[in-house]
Image (tube, rainbow, N blue to C red):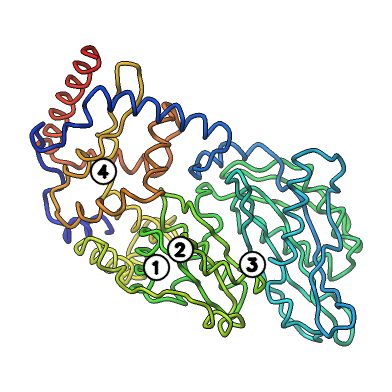
Amino acid sequence: RINSIYCTKRGKKRLKKLSMTNVETASLRAKFLFAHTQRLLKLQSILQRAPSYKTLELQLIEWQERELFEYFVVVSLKKKPSKNSYTPEVTYQFPKLERPTKQMREAEQRLKAIPQFCFPDAKDWGPVSEYTSETFSFMLTGEDGSRRFGYCRRLLPSGKGSRLPEVYCVISRLGCFDLFSTILDEVERRRGISAALVYPFMRSLMESPFPAPGKLIKVKTFLPGAGNEVIELRRPTDSRLEHVDFESLFKCLSVRQVIRVFASLLLERRVIFVADKLSTLSSCMHAVVALLYPFSWQHTFIPVLPGSMLDIVCCPTPFLVGLLSSSVPKLKELPVEEMDDEASLLPRKLQSALVQALEQRNDIISQDSDKYNSLTNLVSEAFIRFFLETIGHYSLFLTQTEHGERVFQREAFRKSVASKSIRRFLGVFMESQMFAGFIQDRELRKTRAKGLFEQRVDQYLEELPDSEQSGVNKFLKGLGNKMKFLHKKN
């Protein structure tokens, strides 16, 4: 249904015939070849030292065989001396940091930041007698661009009278919200009996391997009154969407608002989300980032920004941050620029198809006989189709030099599109760090596991009429011969 909506809106012709005369040939000179080689060598060096761009599939492959989490902390509110306010502090940490290595020092710096993210609203707290537990997450970005997720359960310890809440936080390398939410459910159950029952459970988890997609691990535990128990933790087959809750996103925003946010992120602008609850803020922020797949947001991403760090919104560089409503009065005092021209960026026909698919999401799901269909899969596929229609032909323009280097033909790629509005969109989007990182990743990595997007690209290219494919192939063959001739001449 999604594909048919796009086909109806888009029209028939997608790629046009190319010739050497309608593509800039300056990029074919030997000088360009030398400069491109130098650029690739520099990029390879940078990626080896500090990989700033990593696709989600590569992260999953790299980390799925390692430990389930890095560390577990409990954060409590402590009263400030001679003041009627509280500050968050780590009151328990597992495992302890012992050796003074560089990695340990970096870990210490991360631990210092965690309390602020567990209680971004610390200034608003005082003892309470009732509180419904809340689950949320945040993200820490290292100096090398690596990211770690913090999964939190804020709850009120059992007892009588007014008391302060505490946060149980698990720090892990991967985005697996549902899996860690299950772990936090067990943490809360044990905390309701005794805090002493939480720590042996987390030690058992630390010794368990991270389950591969679609697989489960069994953790043996003991609980007084219940005896020995076995807890099963399973990862979904599609790990890409484990931490995504599109339902919350569409409860908070209309379809057109979601598309406006999507366009703003493609433009790499500064985007601020505001919500009353931490859980709402966290789930919506992770959901909008998931809309960008197969691209990755390359800039500042803070799902829940502590009030003490609000000045970040004055930063001139792109960011995506979430704020609690209590921070809005202070936000209004800051020089924040507002823009509303995002919708004009997206190709009109594709935007119309995206709106239709999302507005008819419930009907599409109910009419689909596929038992695996869900809101999460439908929304994901609708945005993947948008990218297929705009950049799905990218692999046709990755040519190989005589030395085996892969070179992306930027202008030929953009000019091959029949639609003027898509060409205008590409003219802007191709200047983004998201697109640059996506292409660099494919230029530099000659062998790679095919993720979902690459599989959809193969299907998309098979749909192209033979006349469109042959036109592109003929152009690329001539382009390759020209590059070889210039290289030999040099």
Q: How many C-alpha atoms fall within 10 Å of the one at disc 4: few (<14), some, or many (≥20)?
A: some
Identity, as a three-letter code, of the amino acid under mark 1: Val
Q: x and y percent of residue 196 in the render?
A: 91, 61
Question: Disc 4 marks which residue?
Answer: 460
Image quadrant in which you'd find residue 458: top left
- Asked if the residue under mark 1 is in contact with the one under mark 4, i.e. CB atoms within 8 Å, the reply is no
Report the Cα–Cα distance between label 2 and label 1. 8 Å
Q: Nearer the viewer, residue 398 or 155?
A: 398
Describe residue 437's horizontal placement relative to residue 323 as left or right: left
Which numbered disc, 4 or 3, marks the residue closer to the eye?
3
Identity, as a three-letter code, of the amino acid under mark 2: Val
Question: Disc 3 marks which residue?
Answer: 136
Of labels 4 and 3, earlier in sequence is 3
Question: Disc 1 marks which residue?
Answer: 261
Of labels 4 and 1, earlier in sequence is 1
Q: Relative to 191, is 26 above or below? A: above
Q: Nearer the viewer, residue 179 or 51?
A: 51
**The furthest residue to the top:** 488
Identity, as a three-letter code, of the amino acid under mark 4: Tyr
Of labels 1 and 3, earlier in sequence is 3
Q: Secondary structure at mark 1?
A: helix
Question: Disc 2 marks which residue?
Answer: 288
